[in-house]
Image: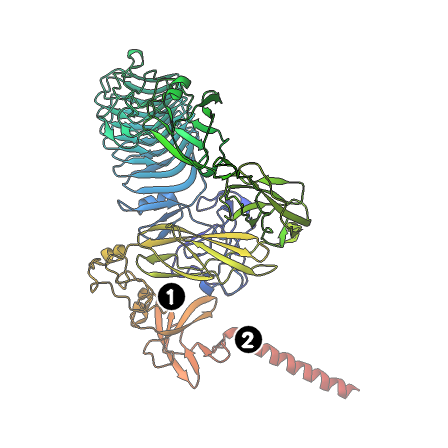
Amino acid sequence: IIYNNCFSNRINALGFGRNLWNVSKEKEENIVGGSHIGGNYWNDYEGEDIDGDGIGDSNLPYNSRGFILNGGDELPLVARAYNVNQGRWYCSLRSAFDNASEGDVIRVCFDLYRGSIVISKGIRLIGNATIDGCGGCGVRINANNAYLENFTILNASIGVYVNGSSAVKKCFIHDCTNGILVDSSENFDISWNIITNNLCGICIDGSSNGEIHHNKVSGNIKGILLNFSFNNTLWRNMIEMNEWGLILGGTSSNNTIYDNYFSDNACNAQEHGFNRWNISKTRGKNVVGGPYLGGNFWKDYEGIDGDHDGLGDEPYHRDGMICKDFHPLVISPSVTYVSPKGSKVSVSSKIVVRFSKPMNESSVEKNFVVVPSVEGTFLWKNDGRELSFEPSNLKYNTKYSVTVTWNAMDRYGNVLLENFSWFFVTERGYQNGYGNAYLPTPNRPPNPPSRPSGPSKGYTNTSYTFCTFSTDPDGDAIFYIFDWGDGTITEIKGVFPSGEKVTASHSWSLPGIYNIKAKAIDTFGHSSAWSETANITIEDIGMLKRPVAVIKVLGRALTGKNITFDASSSYDPDGTIKNYTWFFGDGNKGYGKIVNHTYTLPGNYKVVLTVKDDDGLTNTSIKNIVILLDSDGDGWSDADEERCGTDPFDLNDHPTDGDGDGIPNSIDLDDDNDGLSDFMEALIGSNPNERNSYIMLIIKGKLTYLVDVDRDGYFDTFFDPEKMEKTRVVVRGNKYLIDTNGDGKADYLYNPLSGKVNSLKVTSHSHLWCAILIILATSLFTLILLKRKII
C-alpha cells in the first residue's frame, strides 16, 4: 500500500504488479497540508479538485503516465501552492517561499490554513482561502515589495502584521484583536479590504508615506488608528458603525484625509496633532456621487450646500475634535422618477416627480415650472419624497415641458446640483362635427398578446423562459401579466412600447401539464383578452442526471499563442450535450466543443466550462491555466529565456530544445526525451542528445536496462542502475546473452519474442538435487527387480 507520499520526479512511479496506491478517504491532514488522506501527491497530476476537498476528481486513476501498469491512484492529493512565474507546484507554503525569487507570484491551493504564515521575501501571495490565526498572528510580512491578496483572516491577535513597504489588498479580516497592524513602515498600501468586528480595524503605528484607501471598516471598537504616524493619505474608505471611526493619536500630523465616508460611528473622528481633512476643490466624482472632490462625507454634518457644487458651505469640525474639514461632502437631492413622458398622454394625467430625499415642499413648489403655464394642485406623499401635480386644464395635442429648477431644496437646505427637465405631448382629439372643438379620442384596449413561445417540455424546479408581445391600437405603452397554469400570476416589471417583445421566467415544483397565457394592459388600465395558451409538460427532475464537463487543455501556455480548449470528453449519462460555453478568465468567452483562444497578458487564469444537455440541465468544470509572457513571440517565455541566458526580446535568440518537449537543453534532464536521463546516458555511454532504444528488464527483482547505444537496431549494452555498471551484450540470432556481473560469461538469456529472461547458470544446489533424484530412481528400480525375483 503506497499512500500519503509526495512524488516530484520525471517519472514518478513504475509499477508492474498489483499494488494499492491509496487508502480510503479519511479526515486527516495529509502530506501536502490538505484536510484528507487518500492517495499521494504527484507533481505531474493534471486532474482537478472540483469539490475543493484537496483530492483530485478527474483524470483518474493517476498512473504515472502509464508506468503504473495495473490500476493507479484513485485519490491523488492536490498541492497547497503554485508559483506562477516558475510554473511549478509546491507541497507546502514553506517550500514555495523557500524556492521563490523576489517578485514571484504564488497562488495558494487550500481552503483553510490554521496557524501563522510568514512572508520574508518580496513575493505576491494570492489566495481564495481562509487563514485561522488560532489566537496568534495570521500573516506576518517582514519584507519590502510583498503583496497579500484575497484572503479571509480571522481569530487572530493580529490579522496581518506589516513591517516593510508592502501591500495588503482585497482581504476580509474579522474577529481579531487588530485587523491590520502596520509597524514602523514606509510606502505601504492598505486597500480594498473589508475589516469588521475587531478591537482595532487598521492600526498604523510609527509609519509614514502610506496609502489607506477603498477599505470598508465597520463594527470595530476603533475603526482606524494612526499612532505617531505622519504624511499618510486616507481616501475613499467607508468607515461605519464603529465606536470610534478614525483616531489620529500620539501627535500624528501632516496626514491627508479626504473623500472618506463617515456614518453611524459613536464618534466619527478625533485627532491630537495637525492634519489636513480636505484637498482643494477639484472636479471629479466623489464618494457620494457628487461632482467635486474636497473633504469627507460626515453623516452628522448639519451645514448646507447652497451653491450647487455638492460641498457644504460651512466647515465641519465635530465640536473641535478635529481640525476643520473646509469642504465637507453633501448628498444633494436628485430626481429619481417622473411621469408622464412621451406622446399621446391623456389630458387628465397627473404630473408625478419622485426625489431621492425628503424635500422642502414649499421650496419645490416655488421651483416647479410647466411650459405652457398651467394651473393645478400640489399633493405630497411618502414623507416629502413624491410630488403629484394635478393640472386643471391640459390642452389636446400640446407639448409640455416640466422643470424642477436647481434652487429646489431638501429638508436640510441642500439644493439640486442642476435643473431637471423633461417633456410630454398630450393626445390628439377629434372634431365634434359642430365646430372646431376637440374631444378626447376614445381609448382602445391592447390587442391580445401572441401565444407565449417557449419550451414544450421541462423539469421540476427548473426555470424556463417564455416570450410574447402585443400591439396597442392607440400606440400606448403596455404592461404584461402571465398566468402560469399552477395558480401563479406574474406581473412583468416595467412598461413596454407597443409591439416590443417581453420575456418572463417561471419554474414548477410538481410534474404535470400546464397552460400558459398572457394579457396586456395599457397605461390607461384597459386590458386585452387573454392570449392563446401554450402548453408545457413538466416531469420530475429527480430521475435525471446532470451532464459531466471535462476540460482538456495544456496547463501552461504563452501570451500571443493560439490555445486549443477541448471539451470532447464531456458526456451526458442519460442524453446528449447540446451547448458548450467557455469563460476564459480574461473577460472573453467562447462557444463549442473545441474552441481556440489567445491570451494577451500573462497571469493565472481560471477557465470555466459550462455544458448544457438536452434536458436543460447544466454542469461546470474549472481548470487553471498559467499564461507566461513571451515578449518576442519565439515560443519561449521570458522567464525561460532569462534562465537560459537568451534575449527575451530577440526573436532569433532563444534556447535550444533538441527533443521538442518544451524544456531547454540547458535545464532538461533528458535532452532527447527517450526516457533515459542525461546522467544515466553519460554512465552508459550513449549520446544524451540522440534518442536511444531501450527496454527495462526485471532480473532477480531489480530494474535493469538493455540499451541500443550505437542505434543499429540491436541492444548492445546492459546497465545495472543499482551497481552503476554496464556490460556488453552478445546477440545470438534474435536473442541476447547478458553478462550481469562482468565476468565475461553470459548469465541470462533474453528472448524479445516471448519477453522472458532465463537464467543460464546451474547452481551447486541444482547438481545436488539431480544426484539425489538419480539415487532415488536407481533404488526404486532395484526394489522392483528384487520383488519380481521373489515372486
Which residue bears the numbered disc 1? 721
Identify which amino acid the numbered label 2 is placed on.
Answer: Leu
Mark 1 or mark 2, whichever is nearer to me: 1
- Residue 208 % position (x, y): 23, 27
Find residue 686 and report its image quarter: bottom left
Q: Residue furthest bottom?
A: 789
Find residue 600 and report its image quarter: bottom left
Identify which amino acid the numbered label 1 is placed on.
Answer: Pro
Q: Can I make out residue 136 in this image?
A: no
C-alpha distance separating marks 1 and 2: 34 Å
Q: Check the image and report above or below for 51 versus 655.
A: above
Q: Is residue 481 left or right of residue 208?
A: right
- Residue 243 % position (x, y): 39, 18
**Label 2: few (<14), some (14–19) or many (≥20) C-alpha neighbours in 10 Å:** few
Name the residue nearer the viewer: 555 or 246: 246
Q: Residue furthest front?
A: 434
* The C terminus: image quadrant: bottom right
**Helix, strand, or loop for circle 1?**
loop
Which residue bears the numbered disc 2? 768
Sequence-first disc among 1 and 2:
1
Name the residue nearer the viewer: 643 or 17: 643
Q: Is residue 252 left or right of residue 438?
A: left
